[in-house]
Image (spheres, rainbow, N blue to C red):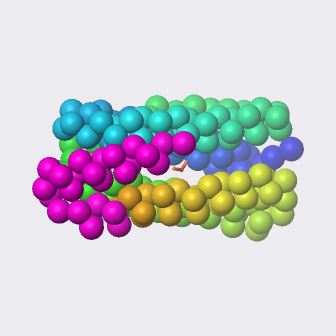
Amino acid sequence: MLSREVIEKLNQQINKEMFSAHLYLSMSSWCYAQGFDGAGAFLFAHADEESAHAKKLITYLNETDSKVELEAIEKPSGEFASLIDVFEKTYAHELTITQSINELVDFTLSCKDYPTFNFLQWYVSEQHEEEALFRGIVDKLKMVSDSGNGLYLADQYIKGLIK
Ligand code: FEO
C-alpha cells in the first residue's frame, strides 16, 4: 500500500513523462518542417519512449491499487531557432526529468517505501542513458558548421540513433 504522498508524486511524474512525449512530438514536427527528416524521425520515435515511461508508472500504480489521476498536459513550445537549439532544449529538459526522478528516489527512501524505491531504479538508469544520448547529439551538432553539408550529415547521424 503506497502512501498518499507517494501516489501524488508518481502521478505528477506521469504528467512530466507525458509532457516529454508532447514536447518531442512538437520538436519532431518543427524538424520535419525545416527538412531535418532524420531528427524529425528520431524525436517522433523518442516520444513513444516517453509515453512508455508514463505507462510504466501507470502500471505500477495499478498494480498497487493506487489511484491514477491524469492531468492536462501543458502546451509545448513549437518554435525553435535552429537544430542545435532543439537538442540543447531536449538535453536541458532531460536534466529536469533526472532532477525530478532523483527527488522521487530521495523521498521514497526517506519514507522507507522500498518497493517504490526499487521500482524507480529503472528510471535512474534510463535517465543516465537519456542524458548521454542527448548530450552526445549536442556535442556532434557543435562540431558541424551551419553549412547545408554539415547539417545534412548531422541529421543523418541523428537518424542512425533510432532504436
Ligand atoms: Fe522519460 Fe526522457 O525521460
The percent coordinates of residue 42 (x first, y second) are: 42, 41
Q: Is residue 51 above or below residue 87?
A: above
Q: Is residue 148 magenta?
A: yes
- Identify which residue is drawn at 19% across, 38% down: 34
- Identify which residue is drawn at 82% across, 35% down: 63
Main SS category, magenta section? helix
Q: Is residue 139 above or below residue 24?
A: below
Q: How many marks?
A: 0
Q: Which residues are magenta?
A: 139-163
Which image quadrant is residue 110 in?
bottom right
- Identify which residue is drawn at 42% across, 64% down: 135
Residue 24 visible to the viewer: no
- Identify which residue is drawn at 48% across, 42% down: 162
Residue 163 appears left or right of 116? left
Quadrant in which the C terminus is drawn: top right
Which image quadrant is residue 142 in?
bottom left
The percent coordinates of residue 104 (x first, y second) are: 65, 59
